[in-house]
């Protein structure tokens, strides 16, 4: 069987949780062979191939995957913080951030206990970077979100509106 150009690279990227961005060369290859790849991933791995105008990625019903959960919690706090500042979420998310800024936002949030087991530096420098969710600039120790963040953003906005209870120290816990 003849596979599309860069088939191995495409499969490895997607299986490793990497988002293929519209600016990537392989985005056009997957787009041009979308029906093939949709069927390939469904039959081979039981994953759904999702394509938007900005990104291509795999989705599954695997609920034990912690990366997405951790990123969603951090984003929910960030979205809540941006909303409290009265700023536009989309403008703010595409600015450059230092990891220490995100850590400070979480530390000063009443939701910090929700993120107590998340290592923010590892989440961003390792996990988000290797999945094309951020572009990390080591020279300035800053990062910017890529368009892949939009996949998580809507759900994070919903999480930031969920009901929480406060413990005796004023920390909020998800109910």
Image (cartoon, helix red, strand yellow):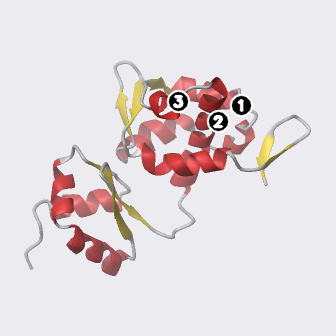
On-image quarter of the N terminus:
bottom left
C-beta proximity under 8 Å, tags 1 and 2:
yes
Q: How crowded is mark 2: few (under 14 residues within 10 Å), some or many (20 or more)?
A: many
What separation in Å lies between label 1 and label 3 (alpha carbons)? 19 Å
Q: Name the residue under label 2.
A: 80
Mark 2 or mark 3: whose residue is earlier in sequence: 2
Mark 1 or mark 3: whose residue is earlier in sequence: 3
Asked if residue 39 is positioned above or below residue 57 in the image, the reply reads below
- Name the spot of residue 49 as percent of width and height, x first: 34, 66
Q: Mark 1 points at which residue?
A: 109
Residue lying at 34% horizontally and 19% vertically, measured from the top left: 139
In the image, 35: left or right of 127? Answer: left
Q: Residues within 10 Å of mark 1 (few under 14, many from 20)?
A: some
Residue lying at 42% horizontally and 24% vertically, measured from the top left: 142
On-image quarter of the C terminus:
bottom right
Query: In the figure, residue 104 lies in which quadrant?
Result: top right
- Which mark's residue is nearer the viewer, 2 or 3? 3
| Secondary element type, mark 1 | loop
Residue lying at 36% horizontally and 25% vertically, measured from the top left: 138
């Amino acid at each position: 069987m003849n596979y599309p150009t860069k088939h191995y690279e495409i499969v490895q990227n997607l299986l490793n949780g990497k988002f293929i961005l519209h600016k990537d060369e392989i985005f056009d290859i997957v787009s041009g062979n979308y029906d093939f790849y949709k069927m390939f991933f469904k039959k081979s791995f039981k994953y759904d191939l999702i394509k938007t105008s900005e990104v291509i990625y795999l989705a599954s019903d695997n609920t034990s995957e912690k990366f997405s959960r951790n990123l969603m919690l951090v984003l929910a706090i960030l979205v809540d913080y941006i909303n409290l500042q009265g700023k536009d979420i989309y403008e703010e998310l595409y600015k450059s951030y230092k990891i220490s800024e995100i850590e400070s936002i979480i530390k000063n949030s009443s939701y910090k206990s929700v993120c107590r087991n998340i290592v923010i530096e590892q989440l961003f420098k390792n996990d988000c970077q290797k999945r094309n969710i951020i572009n990390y600039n080591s020279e300035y120790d800053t990062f910017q979100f890529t368009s892949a963040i939009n996949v998580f953003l809507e759900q994070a906005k919903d999480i930031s509106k969920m009901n929480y209870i406060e413990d005796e120290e004023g920390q909020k816990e998800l109910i």
